[in-house]
Image: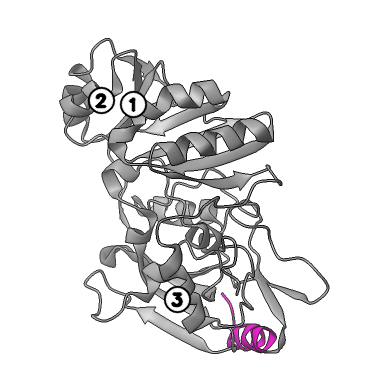
Amino acid sequence: MSTLTEVDELCETVARARRVAPVGSRTHWEVGGPAPAGADVALVSAPAGIRAYDPADLTVTVGAGTRGDELAAVLAVAGQECVLDPRDGAATVGGLLATGLSGHRRLRYGPLRDRVLEVRFVTADGRMVKGGGPTVKNVSGFDLPRLLVGSLGSVGVLVQVTLRCQPLPATATWCVTDTDPFSVRRDLYRPSSLLWDGSRTYVLLEGFAADVEVEQATIVEAEPATGPAWPTGPHRGRISVRPSALRALAPALDRAGVRWSAEIGVGTVHVAADDEASLARARTASVSAGGWLLREAGAPGLDGFGDGPPNTKLMRRVLDAFDPNRKLSPGRLSTEGMDG
């Protein structure tokens, strides 16, 4: 558990520094724009540890520097979880929220930002600010917690968060089939995840055993599976498109020469390539499909966002209000010219 002194020191460091880069476990260090570098960059880390947890309230308050696997272990003792679903258990809670990359169970549980109830963060001028409320029935007013999710540390340095918890599912089962993924989606009630790699469809079913068995029986030629293998490679990205565009996008990704896995019903496509040129072709394909590609790792010659997400103008206005000098994580969230 952090002390008041630790938080005061963090505020003072941020206030005095010329540029600031929040640092967690660096598992998402390459996401988006390049991480700030140079002698004038102050690297700051958030406190770690569980601050408050009452299973009856279904909420937990943690330091933003807490590892995801450590949080999961604490909640599991009480038969609960917080649906963060990090690829790497070493990822910190603050890092996961700052990148805003929802896990593979978004189809059922919604985006990552839905887990956040309250945030405490340090502004560019060194002030501690609180947003949201510590209960499931949240307070009214502007939703600051959601604003910080996906901000890559450009709005403020996350210090402490209160998260929504839920009971662990009684049963969780992966199965795989060659059946068309869109047909599978229509036949199921509430799958937790439905992933398609162009040839096979992987389905995650969660809930009571009897319900899971009924759902599994509706999938044509379903076989038990351990879960899909995520696309891997030195150059990785994440495409966002309309869910209805996935079928048309698939052949274009094959021609681009990338490995991919699409989240049916969500519109997220995870891509990996052996060379930067292939990832660039995948970005072109995503734009043609009405979407965009976020660089997650590698591909140093590619801009983190390409032409940028659809809310670029709004993000610029937010940064103008919270950090007009672009002191926090400069360049991480921006497209060309966003840093002023």
Residue type indicated by callout 1 = Arg
Label 2 sits on residue: 182
Q: Is residue 22 magenta?
A: no
Q: Nearer the viewer, mark 1 or mark 2?
A: 1
Q: Nearer the viewer, residue 281 or 41?
A: 281
In the rendered view, would you say 255 is above or below 115? above
Q: Are marks 1 and 2 in contact (CB under 8 Å)?
A: yes
Picture quadrant where residue 59 is located: bottom left
**Apparent side of residue 306 relative to residue 145 in the rendered image (left or right):** right
Asked whether the viewer can see residue 156, the reply is yes
Disc 2, SS: helix
**Apparent side of residue 121 relative to residue 211 in the rendered image (left or right):** right
**Residue 317's mark?**
3
Q: Nearer the viewer, mark 2 or mark 3?
A: 3
| Colour scheme in use | one colour
Picture quadrant where residue 179 is located: top left
The magenta segment = 1-15
Q: Are marks 3 and 1 in contact (CB under 8 Å)?
A: no
Q: Nearer the viewer, residue 298 or 7?
A: 298
In percent of width and height, residue 61 lies at 42, 70
